[in-house]
Amino acid sequence: MAEGPLPAPIKTTCPYCGTGCGVDARPMNGVVTVAGDAQHPTNAGRLCVKGSALGDTVVPQGRLLHPQLRDRSAPGQPARRVSWDEALDTVAGQLRRLIDTHGPESVAWYVSGQLLTEDYYVANKLVKGFVGTANIDTNSRLCMSSAVAGHKRAFGEDIVPVAYDDLERADLIVLVGSNTAWCHPILFQRMIKAREQRPDMKIVVLDPRATATTEMADLHLGLRAGSDVRLFNGLFAQLHRQGLADRDFVDAHVGGFDDTLAAADDGATLEQLADDCGLEPEKLAQFYALFAATERVITCFSMGVNQSSAGTDKVNSILNCHLLTGRIGKPGMGPFSLTGQPNAMGGREVGGLANMLAAHMDLENAEHRDRVQRFWNSPAIASQGGLKAVDLFEAIEAGRVKAVWIMATNPVVSLPDADRVKRALDKCELVIVSDVMQQTDTTAFAHVLLPAQGWGEKDGTVTNSERCISRQRAFVAPLGEARPDWWMLTEVARRWGYAEQFPYHAVHEIFDEHARLSAFENDGERYFDIGGLAGLNARGYDAIAPQRWPVRRDAGDEPAHLQVFADGRFYHADGRARLVPTPPRRPAHGTDVDFPLVLNTGRVRDHWHTMTRTGLSARLSSHIAEPYVDLHPRDARRANIENGALARVSTRWGNLVVRARISDEHTAGTLFVPIHWNAQFSSDARVGALVNPVVDPVSGEPEFKHTPARVQAFIPAWHGFILSRKPVSIAHLAWWTRVTGASFTRYELAGEGSSVAWPELARLMLGATDADVDWLEYVDAATGSYRAGYVVDDRLEAVIFVSRQPSLPSRAWLAGLFAAERLDDEDRFGLLAGQPAVAGADEGATICSCFGVGLNRIVGAIESGKASSVQALGEVLKCGTNCGSCVPELKKILARARIATPQR
Ligand SMILES: Nc1nc2c(c(=O)[nH]1)N[C@H]1C(S)=C(S)[C@@H](COP(=O)(O)OP(=O)(O)OC[C@H]3O[C@@H](n4cnc5c(=O)[nH]c(N)nc54)[C@H](O)[C@@H]3O)O[C@H]1N2
Ligand SMILES: Nc1nc2c(c(=O)[nH]1)N[C@H]1C(S)=C(S)[C@@H](COP(=O)(O)OP(=O)(O)OC[C@H]3O[C@@H](n4cnc5c(=O)[nH]c(N)nc54)[C@H](O)[C@@H]3O)O[C@H]1N2
Ligand code: SF4
Ligand SMILES: [Mo]
């Protein structure tokens, strides 16, 4: 029978990073396949590795399916399934009781840049306009709040003045504190492609760490952590000295010059500046010269800038250099804040932060408050800023805030001093959590669990880094009783008697209201204006094509894509921008004898945040399987830690145990631990528990990138791993990590007790209790080595490998055996050796997740002379030819192989 044509895809938007790629989703027979949307202006058909694997995450595993109530005073009691009515009556009733007894400030919401604009709008309206408190903050506090504060100080409004196609027009792209190659992969690929087409274009990266992004850079400045302000102040002073200030532009449009120059220029020499920033003077001079000589420069910045106790000053020190030179408001130039979450920008539009109102209006502004209150027809409106994320959880711990509704974020993992978050939630009278997953570190504390619709089920809009609004469209039926977040909020509002102000039955009605508010009494005073999208019916809304705001109603012949600030008009009351003095200061806590190293934290290529979704995908779990700490050989030697062994990292706030990755590519004196692992995936790897909760005084953003720390060896009695088709109970062990495999689960283990009776224990753990299973076993008491496995109907069921040493055979080859329906004799022969009987069949660690190409195969192809370039590797092995996310790593493997193999 001939195959029919593929069904037409549903066009939607990727739910991961702020790049905001368009996705074609095709659900078929319970499986979702995805491809890049060729018509989307952001990605023109491409997807990175996380986007390509989205289908793996639209699955029922682990989903929260029904509303539940849990009586936390009766420990051990499971949550009780209830109807939506009972759950919502409980939420509305309990919150009302607390508000009536203790006032509106006694309750709070903690929401997320992963909500859709419509969810976010309703949450913000309900809390600020109807509860009458601004105690609603969002995880964007941990992410974008320094950028928001910096923009407001400089421009008078939170406006990002660069669009993606400007990157293609720039001659210099400076990436500050951004691992773009891994965190905004498709945007990064656009930059690399632009450089291929115009080889004069340069990419400079400022990051204390060597990353996949620095691998591709023309120049990497490995500056000392926290020294960005000093570096950009130095640039400001030098640009001024060289006469590169655009006097006309500054005179006409920018205030604050004298004070800013005074703060920036303390007369330091280039050598002094370089020394303060931990750089070679030549390198710093090279960067300054490049910046000075290039008119079309875009400075992109991300978490290495925002997540700092001087985050807002870091942002302004960058904006200052652009304002001084007038390199803003023209094609191919400007400062560019890269947003992290898919709807970080949408959250800013609706005023999701505790110190904002809605539609780019301010809480502190009485006229704005009055305007919004009239528009909402609301009984009250918050008149002062609410608690910012870190303060909010402190207030919960102190008992001042008695109820919190957490929505689409996992604060027990992602906030700094995360053990305090646990203590706070433990004490809190009422914890409501809406999430898509049943079991997270945060849902464990919920009294009320509300099942939210996930990606593919929910419907709405998101706005990406360049202010492009795109639709996320539903393409599968919601699982269980999952409902949209806006619906839950609306139902609570109605129970409080606000049915008239919350009349929503469908998502387009909310978007319409949001669009109308943006235009309401605007008259050009606020740049954020999408009045042109108001009045759409369901069909019109569904058809919204990706477009950048502003979208004004009476735009006349305004070009579709405006160049922001082209007319030199800014949004302070006097229409001018501001240079902001940024005297440099060091990170809040310096190192000392007890904590001599700097702990830096961030992301890996294939995981998203707390892994609730990417952790479901075998493909995405194979690139970096375990939590780790990167450290320099010098620091490892001092602590007696070997590569691949376990290490304990401690700070004043907490500690964890993870795998040590030692390399002289890492910066001496610093540690890097990824943010993703948590109690669902590892016994002891939640790095948030170690992070200093100090925040930037202006933005309230925590200093996630800089906590004084120390590292020690962690030496268990034995190391081991299990691969098993059935789940294995490992929670009692000293240390463990769980990794999703294709048809099995992998467990990395370490334990105490030198005289473990392995033969009995292993059969029990692996569930091979039937006497007649085909059980294979190898014991070497002398070396403490134990290996076993079993086969049912010729199919491998499970293996366990244990040793006193951390070095154990490769998991990759064994993992491959689980794919086969039958274990052949050769494989059976190699099984307990952990090695293929035929040489060369072991993939090694996955590099290309799209095609499952491992390190060993890549090195093999290079060493055998079959490939000597990224392109040739792609031709021979396909690696790097789909999403391209692994190209920086391929480049690095090639470079290493070139060093290792003498030239012939
Ligand atoms: N794969 C993947 N992609 C993601 C995410 C994810 O979870 N996984 N999350 C998304 C989200 S929400 C966000 S916010 C973005 C974050 O995207 P990025 O900001 O690019 O990612 P991070 O890894 O947090 O940190 C960036 C870099 O800042 C550097 N840094 C540390 N201290 C300093 C400093 O003092 N100065 C400078 N100049 N640099 C410093 C770190 O070494 C690190 O390499 O990624 C988004 N994209
Ligand atoms: N140490 C350290 N910590 C950090 C950072 C760092 O660099 N270092 N970065 C910070 C940054 S920038 C960010 S953005 C945060 C991210 O941190 P979090 O926001 O805590 O991380 P996520 O895993 O994205 O959490 C999203 C939660 O929402 C659920 N969810 C998904 N979709 C929906 C939905 O539609 N509705 C609802 N109700 N729930 C949904 C998911 O299952 C998950 O539990 O981490 C911050 N924490
Ligand atoms: S770059 Fe990757 S994660 Fe980010 S939006 Fe595009 S496909 Fe999604
Ligand atoms: Mo973020």
Image: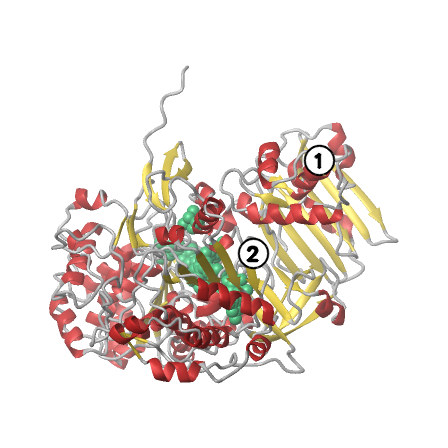
Q: How far apart are marks 1 and 2 (CA)?
A: 40 Å
Mark earlier in primary sequence (1, 2): 2
- The type of residue carrying mark 1 is Gly
Q: Is residue 525 left or right of residue 440?
A: left
Q: Is 640 located above or below residue 883 in the figure?
A: below
Q: State the residue in front, 781 or 674.
A: 674
Q: Can you say which quadrant of the picture contains the N terminus?
A: top left
User: Which residue ends up furthest to the front in the rendered image?
Assistant: 243
Residue at 25% across, 67% down = 568
In the visual, does 64 lie left or right of 807?
Answer: left
- Residue at 22% over, 57% down: 550
Percent coordinates x, y for residue 697 in the rendering: 40, 80
Q: Nearer the viewer, mark 1 or mark 2?
A: 1
Residue assigned mark 1? 865
Residue 440 horizontal side relative to residue 355, left or right: right
| Residue wearing tag 2 | 681
Label 2 packing within 10 angstroms: few (<14), some (14-19), many (20+) = many
Q: Where is residue 221 in the image (x, y as percent from the top left)?
A: 56, 65
| Residue 138: image location, x then y, percent | 36, 67
What scheme was used to colour the molecule? secondary structure
The amino acid beneath tag 2 is: Phe
